Amino acid sequence: MEPMPSEIFDFIKECVDGFGDMVMDMEMVYNTKVFPNQVSGSGFCTKVVTKAIVAEAAGENRVIIEFMVSDGEYTVPCIAHNADADYLEGSIEGEALTDFLQILTESQKKGKRVEIQGHFVNLGRKRVFLCENVEIDDGFKESQLTKEQFKKFKALCSKHNNPKNRWDAVGTTTPIALMLREDTIWAELYAQPYLKQAVLLFCLSPARKQDMIHVGIVSSHGEGKDHLVERVIQPLVPARLAGSGKMATIPGLFGAMSGDDLNTIEIGLLPKMNHERVAISEFQTWGDETFGELMNMMANGKIEMQKGALDIERATTLNLLFLGNPPNYYSEEKHDKKEMLAAFGKYTHQIISRLSLIFTQLSLNGGKAQERIRNAIISSMDGDFIGNEVENDLNYWRAFFKEYLRYVSRMTPRLRDWIGTINSTYDEMEARPQFQAAFCIRTVTDNRKYQEFANLVRAFARLQGDEKINGKHIKLAQYLFEVSLQTLTEEFPLAAMMEGVDNDLIKLFKRIQNKGSVFESLAEMRAGVKGLTNDRVDSLIRSKALTKFDNGAYFVNDSWLEEIEGGELHVD
Amino acid sequence: MSIESQAELETWKYLRATYYVRFKEGITKLSWDVRFDVLKNLHGEWIDQGDDPVGAMMEYVFDNGYFSFFCKGVKVTEEGAFTLHRLISANLGPVGIYDEWF
């Protein structure tokens, strides 16, 4: 690893020193309960009720809106009213109170965040938050990195970058290269480059449903999957961990009516993390019904609930990371790689279709880095990253990249300019037998997989902070997509591939097989088998699928499919 | 071969930098007997030369490299879309251009 250019690190420190804390929850509001301090917070309206005020001091026809704002951890009772000051301070006059009610109702029904400002007051025997201002907060946080800082960072990255060649997509100091380094955000965990890249993609904030990137990692226990979330992802970006089957209930994940008050719809973990990300640990312990509920969310970025009289929609535009183990009966020798995915239960195909990237490897490090992994474990246990300069530097990098990732998540590089190359690259991958086997393609073209690939291209452009797509982004996306494919499938026999045996040829062979085992002539074989060109016949003969006799007859080798699947194909 | 548009040019650059590199790796792993058949098939108009056609092709490759064969097996449209001859696809990595050392 080349030394980090001090100019880059000094610049990052300077930026981070200027960043402030951002209000993302209701904790600060909750903590000022006993003081009358002016404070603001952000959460979801979980209940709203409008009542008449009957006290004479309030004036005639006065109303009070009672509502609850919750961030999922802290719930605060709030009010807004239009009573006279003799009854209660902070009256909101005229239309403004109607706007209040509309915003709160929208928040409750559509699960939109609201930002509230005000202070606590006594109302009778109750302590309530008197709300003076309420605004819809789209939850897609602005970065604290300014445009000038971003530009300067990019310029510094270019200045120090030393690529191997002009098509080296990562280089030495591009933003991705910096984010992959072990002295920036990967100090506490050793991981393969492809896994690091997948995690960086997961750390982007999805603005719209098309931006969501769902990643699945299925590997043996003890591979450090939870460590990955705790030591890499959570210190870098807002991410919550959903636990095992019994702990991650449908009401807990999606929200449900409160047991205390049926008019209150509690916030589930997924709506709460809108525009952020959730990691799901030990997903193999989840029930089928939980995966069933997830499917809409994964595809549409929202969930809909009908609870009593309330018809509610909650935005859940977020990235999901599935971390789990293969089924306990899985054996690498006996089972197909796809069997590892049985952990997704009866919705395996649907979930796989919605995952942008899936990695199924018993060992995530390839077994080549045992010493480095053990070093990372011992360093973590010894507290090498706590209370010292290393921790200090790490915190600077994490704080900077948190804002960097927020900044680039708002960029929308246009895919249209490269549509030809993107389409052809995807078509070439999709035509491979491994692709179709891995993703269980049921239709001619899987548009969801195509969309996921195009999204990966754009996501790499974002990670690099590039306004325009270029070939390097396609290359990175293609590599990662193919790594995912590689881990999902057994190697297709190389000899067969060299002979151009592809899925079409296999289909053609099956059609010939259905017609008979011996054909007196090529013309007889061709009759009724559309697409049997000389070229294809030649490929079938060369790959030993067909044998041509001296008298012009053709013999169909019925065991050919078994042979190529077992890698026994012979090439003359 | 004439390049008609910027999109076509960009695609050729992309193919040269990614697919061709992997194709060259793949093709050079084949024995010359098989490689000869693959390259001849890709070329489409190759005429065997002399008593030792494989040797003649080896000499041609030594002088000119594999790119001309690669170009014969690739079609790029003005919009930048491309198609690969199945023998190019077959001689990339097992799942495409991904390199296991990546």
Image (cartoon, coloured by chain):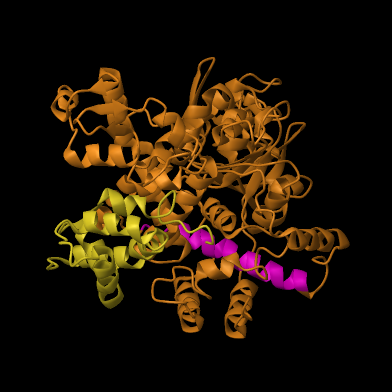
- Give, as a single range, the part of the protein colored magenta: A390-412
Image location of residue A496, percent across then percent down: 39, 43
Image location of residue A142, percent across then percent down: 50, 58
Up the image or down, A172 lies above or below A508; here it is: below
Which residue: 21% across, 65% down? Answer: B51
Please give the count of numbered marks on the rendered protein.
0
* Residue A403 appears in view: yes
Front one among A572 and A97: A572
Which residue: 38% across, 46% down? Answer: A571
Quarter of the figure with the N terminus of chain A: bottom right
Front one among A258 and A558: A558
A513 vs A481, left or right, is left
Q: What secondary structure do most residues of the magenta stretch adopt?
A: helix
Does the magenta portion include B101?
no
Chain yellow in the figure, letter:
B
Front one among A490 and A114: A490
B62 vs A271, left or right, is left
Does the magenta portion include A395?
yes
Q: Within the image, what quadrant is residue B44 found in?
A: bottom left
Q: Of all residues shown, which one is farthest toward the top?
A: A308
Image location of residue A94, percent across then percent down: 45, 39
Up the image or down, A89 lies above or below A512; here it is: below
Tell me what hue chain A is rendered in: orange
Image location of residue A312, percent across then percent down: 49, 26
Which residue: 50% across, 47% down? Answer: A486
